[in-house]
Amino acid sequence: MTTALLIIDHGSRLKAANHMLFDVVKAMRSHRPDLLVYGSHMELAVPTIADGVAWCMTRGATRIIAHPYMLSPGRHATRDIPQLVADAMAAYPQVAYTVTDPLGVDDHLLKLIVKRAKV
């Protein structure tokens, strides 16, 4: 089984604002070289979620995990992204996919904030 991790952020018209996603993708590829990792945007920028799914498929993905790179479990992470992923995956009914929950309030994130804030 070839697993692909599709990391999805909101997207912005400002290129500089979109750069962080690709830093995360690069770091994840180094951290987990066994995964296909790709970044895409929900809206306002390219590559889109459909572009990301297509990239994964051309590299032989048999399973896609879509992860909203967002902190809050708001409408985009719980409704819009899952729908856009489902729409893109409709062309590949033979491929399993899941959409994970956004980061939210996670113990690891809380520890990282304390560490970074040095408090």
Image (tube, rainbow, N blue to C red):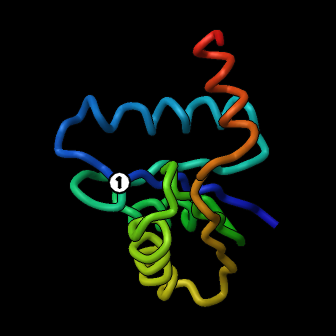
The one of 109 and 17 positioned closer to us in this rendering = 109
State the residue position of label 1. 10
Residue 110 location, quadrant: top right
Left or right of residue 1: residue 20: left
Farthest residue to the right: give it: 1
The one of 85 and 58 positioned closer to us in this rendering = 85
Left or right of residue 104: residue 11: left
Instruction: Estimate the x, y position of residue 91 in percent, counting from the top left.
Output: 48, 86
Residue type at mark 1: give it. Answer: His
Q: Residue at x 53, y 49 (%)?
A: 38
Farthest residue to the front: give it: 119
Q: Quadrant of the N terminus?
A: bottom right
Q: Residue at x 61, y 59 (%)?
A: 59
Q: Residue at x 78, y 45 (%)?
A: 34
Helix, strand or loop at mark 1 = loop
Instruction: Estimate the x, y position of residue 43 in percent, counting from the top left.
Output: 27, 60
The one of 12 and 51 positioned closer to us in this rendering = 12
Residue 98 location, quadrant: bottom right
Q: Quadrant of the C terminus?
A: top right
Residue neighbourhood size for the residue with mark 1, other residues' Cα within 10 Å, grouped as few (<14), some (14–19), many (≥20): some
Quick check: 10 above or below 111?
below
The one of 82 and 112 positioned closer to us in this rendering = 112
Instruction: Estimate the x, y position of residue 67 in percent, counting from the top left.
Output: 58, 58
Quick check: 89 above or below 105?
below
Instruction: Estimate the x, y position of residue 81 in percent, counting from the top left.
Output: 44, 70
Farthest residue to the left: give it: 13
